[in-house]
Amino acid sequence: MTNGKVNNILIPNVSKISSDKKVNLDNKLGKGVQDSEFSKLLQDQVQQTGQKHGIQLSTHAAKRLQERNLSMDSDEFFKLKGAMDKLKTKGGQDSLIITDKAAYIVDVPKNKIVTAIDKNSILDNVFTKIDSTVIV
């Protein structure tokens, strides 16, 4: 800057963009894409991911988990997954998996949790029609 004048070489020419210009993102996302469709796609993806990892939850088991205030955190999930993988290699069919939180009856070939029993109720139950047990 010399003599109160701005050097045009160092400062680029910047002009204001009119504020009436609006961008329509609908065309970028595809016609008719709605939040509900996105939610459905996301939910489908989550379900597929769970199935890829190999554990499904029966309606009965989901109901028991809720009734007995049992939570399925990642630690519990990976314990069950590891136990089911071991059972598969040993030929387990209908098995009992006992963790420090709960006991689960699982259908090994279908990778499905059939029911869940909280830790405090394990001693009060009789487990029938199982061919193997894993304690993790």
Image (cartoon, grey):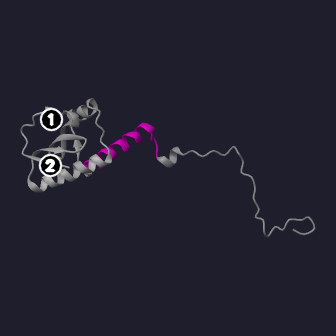
Res 118 visible: no
Q: Which residue in the protein does label 2 denote? A: 134
Label 2: state its secondary structure.
Answer: strand
Q: Which amino acid type corresponds to the residue marked 2 in the rendered image?
A: Val
Residue under label 1: 123
Dot 2 crowding, Cα within 10 Å, few <14, some 14–19, many 20+? some
SS assignment at label 1: helix
Along the line of sight, which residue is nearer the eye, 19 or 80? 80
Please check the rendered image and state whether residue 33 is part of the magenta-colored stretch, yes or no.
Answer: yes
The magenta stretch spans which residues? 30-51
Say which label, 2 or 1, has the lower sequence index. 1
The kind of residue on which mark 1 rests is Leu
Residue 94 lies in what quarter of the image?
top left
Residue 10 coordinates in the image, percent (x, y) = 78, 69
Residue drawn at x 8%, y 53% is 91
Relative to 92, is 1 on the left or the right? right
> In this orientation, which residue lies closer to the viewer: 58 or 95?
95
Residue 92: image x %, image y %?
9, 50
Chief secondary structure of the magenta span? helix
Quadrant in the picture for the N terminus:
bottom right
Number of the front mark, 2 or 1:
1
CA gap between label 2 and label 1 equals 16 Å
